[in-house]
Amino acid sequence: MQPQPPSSDQLRALDKAHLWHPFTQMQDWCAPEHEPLVIASGEGVWLRDTEGKQYIDGNSSIWTNIHGHGHSAINAAIRDQVDQISHCSGLGFTNKAAILLAEKLVQLFPPDTLTRVFYSDDGSTAIECACKMAIQYHQLDGQNERCAFVAFDQAYHGDTTGAASLGGIDTLHQRFSSFGFDTTHVRDLEQLKQLPAGMISKLSAIIIEPLIQGAAGMKLWPAGMLRELRLWCDAHNIFLILDEVMTGFGRTGTMFACEQEEVVPDFMALAKGLTGGYLPLAATLTREAVFEKFLGSQEEQKTFYYGHSYNANPLGCAAALANLEIFEIENTLEKLQGKIALLKTLLTEHLKPLGHVGEIRQCGFIVGIDIVRDKQSLTHWPAEQKTGAAVCLAARCHDLLTRPIGDTLVLMPPLCISNAELETAVTALAKSISLLTPDS
């Protein structure tokens, strides 16, 4: 007889016995009364748990899924690649999928701008690659003093040591801030301009999440800010690093957020949606002038000594190639424009009138909704009440899964969501918010 698959309760017990979850207070997670949701399968924008209940994937499986779960083209690309080879080293060898993906990525930008692709594993490592490249570039240029960075308050660029030191959210980054890159945080462009000349002369690069800061609570940058920052960097001969880990691959309505202000960075970090949300893969793109600085004989020691075991992994690259082909075949970005407009209408009609909804921020297909105790004064519930989490838990009863950032609800569904499914998602949030009372 075939052994019976474990029940939901058995899986939950095993989870609590052995797993350590990210960004999670495990004392709460392991409490007897907590019943973790165990996801079993997915199709399109829908996720299914081990009890057979379905939910709209309202945050694209932590901001990664682009074209939906189980897309036939990506599934087929991965199967075809598995039949050939699942992995081979990017150190000393190369592979077809990695080569073709690099070509495809650079073709997404104006000619002779971002021409080189360095693969890694995730957003954090893509950022670390960019920072280390920037520092080593200046070392090779005889400017060893140019090893500092500017990042922005409330920024999030990942959790590895270097990336965490760039972050500007105390809860996530403060205890590790002194162990990574030499970083100065500024509030905005005006504060950047007020930095002393001596500090500016030591800067290697400035890093920013273009148009919108994710982990900050989906906070929008002022229109034109990114273009002005590009000009400031050019005037001071400072590299600009764009973190498009969250914003890339259509999330803001264009393939990359920086397109909306006609900005091309010196380094761009890509991950999350690169493979359509299927496999871990990241890429750091840079200019030919940066690449050429690293060229030389072995004796000169100009090599970029950085890498990962799964660098240029063929499976991830095959999935990413299929992801980009879907954008073309299905006209994803063109179809998305109407959904962005519909989303704005739905938010205005269903959420804006509610007494506990404060500011609603939308950037393309990314939405942050502040829930407040009092709409007039914009006062919040105490953080320990976890009101945002409670609203998201209630939304499960209305077929929606998402996660909050504090008391900011996040809605970021896969780009393939239908108009009817989009209305279901917004309505689920409205019903869940309506359960709140000032004393809840």
Image: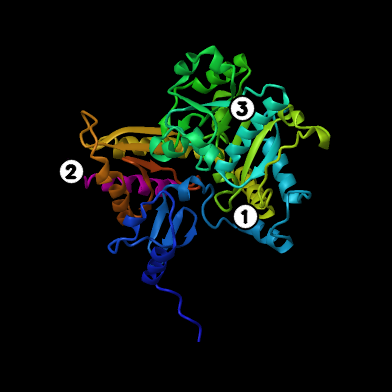
Residue 38 occupies quadrant: bottom left
Dot label at residue 73: 1
Question: Where residue 160 sits: x, y (%)?
Answer: 53, 43
Residue drawn at x 68%, y 25% as measured from the top left = 138
Whether 28 is drawn above or below 296: the answer is: below
Q: Main secondary structure of the magenta part?
A: helix
Question: Where residue 283 sits: x, y (%)?
Answer: 63, 41
Whether 79 is drawn above or below 328: the answer is: below
The kind of secondary structure element at disc 2 is loop
Amino acid type indicated by mark 1: Ala
The answer to whether 175 appears left or right of 108 in the picture is left
Dot label at residue 437: 2
The CA distance from mark 1 to mark 2 is: 46 Å
Classify mark 1: residues with Cα within 10 Å, few (<14), some (14-19) or many (20+). Answer: some
Residue drawn at x 68%, y 30% as measured from the top left = 136
First-in-chain label (2 vs 3): 3
In the image, 181 versus 253, the foreground residue is 181
First-in-chain label (1 vs 2): 1
For this orientation, the residue located farthest to the left is 439
Amino acid type indicated by mark 2: Thr
Classify mark 2: residues with Cα within 10 Å, few (<14), some (14-19) or many (20+). Answer: few
The kind of secondary structure element at disc 3 is loop
In front of the other: label 2 or label 3?
A: 3
Classify mark 3: residues with Cα within 10 Å, few (<14), some (14-19) or many (20+). Answer: some
First-in-chain label (3 vs 1): 1
